């Protein structure tokens, strides 16, 4: 089963609004990463947050991590049409440095 | 330019005809991995390699082979492709492993097996 699961599956907002996506996972992790994918293209790394961190910022992105709830959220502020993409969380498997698990993704549509 | 290069970008083949999808990275990364992406199933890891001559199974290795003879190359081999291997495939690399540093992805190979 998938380690990371995103919620919601799809999100549609107006330009300028904020978008929040959530990710839940099942087992202990060392870190969690968020990626973005434009239609059919390769994934692009957005942000990495380690298990001992609670919040991280990068430009208009804010990621939080709650290890007690095994969940993370990605907030995109002041969204733009160019933010339209699918967003995935990815977690490592604590006991295996080589394995990684991606969720099914949240498809974000930002309407101009 | 730092990149992961996959070839071909699109491939249509018939059941049972052996094929290889190449992957090359120019960042001197130790770690490389293959994923397949299917609608509703997200990305699933096929095989990964922590370093030269070291490969390991991911979550869905059946029907696939890999090799890591050189640091920069990590080809994915389908000895006898079947229609259920129709998918979008991605190669990725990172400097320290799947979780210690960001993964850099190729642009994908869309495979259709008829």
Image (cartoon, helix red, strand yellow):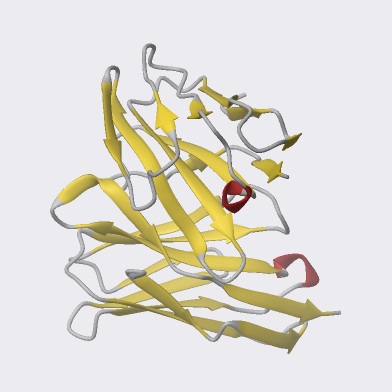
- Vertical comparison of A10 with A36: above or below: below
The residue nearer to you, when weighing B67 against A41, is: B67
Question: In the drawing, does residue B26 fall left or right of residue A15?
Answer: left
In front here: B16 or B46?
Answer: B16
Quarter of image, res B108: top right
Q: Residue furthest left?
A: A95
Report x, y in % for residue B40: 57, 71
Q: Residue at point 18% right, 48% down?
A: A96
Q: Residue at x 57, y 47 (%)?
A: B85
Residue most extreme to the right:
A112
Q: Is residue B32 left or right of residue B80?
A: left
**Image spot of residue B113 (x, y percent):** 69, 43
Closer-to-camera residue (A12/B68): B68
* Residue at the image point whose x is 73% and y is 70% from the top: A84
Location of residue A49 by image quarter? bottom left
In which quadrant of the rendered image does the N terminus of chain A lie?
bottom left
């Amino acid at each position: 089963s998938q380690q990371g699961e995103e919620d919601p599956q799809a999100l549609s907002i107006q330009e300028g609004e904020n978008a929040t996506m959530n990710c839940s996972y099942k087992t202990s992790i060392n870190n969690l990463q968020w990626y973005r994918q434009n239609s059919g293209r390769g994934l692009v790394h957005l942000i990495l947050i380690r298990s001992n961190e609670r919040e991280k910022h990068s430009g208009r992105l804010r990621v939080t991590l709650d290890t007690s709830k095994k969940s993370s959220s990605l907030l995109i502020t002041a969204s733009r049409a160019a933010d339209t993409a699918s967003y995935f969380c990815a977690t490592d498997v604590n006991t295996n440095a080589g394995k990684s698990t991606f969720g099914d993704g949240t498809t974000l549509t930002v309407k101009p | 330019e730092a990149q992961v290069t996959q070839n071909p970008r699109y491939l249509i083949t018939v059941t049972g005809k052996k094929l290889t999808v190449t992957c090359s990275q120019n960042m001197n990364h130790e770690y490389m991995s293959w994923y397949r992406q299917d609608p509703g199933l997200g990305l699933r890891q096929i095989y990964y390699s922590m370093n030269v001559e070291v490969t390991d199974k991911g979550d869905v290795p059946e029907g696939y082979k890999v090799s890591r003879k050189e640091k920069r190359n990590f080809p994915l081999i389908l000895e006898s492709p079947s229609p259920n291997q129709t998918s979008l495939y991605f190669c990725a690399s990172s400097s320290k492993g799947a979780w210690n540093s960001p993964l850099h992805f190729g642009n994908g190979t869309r495979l259709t097996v008829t």
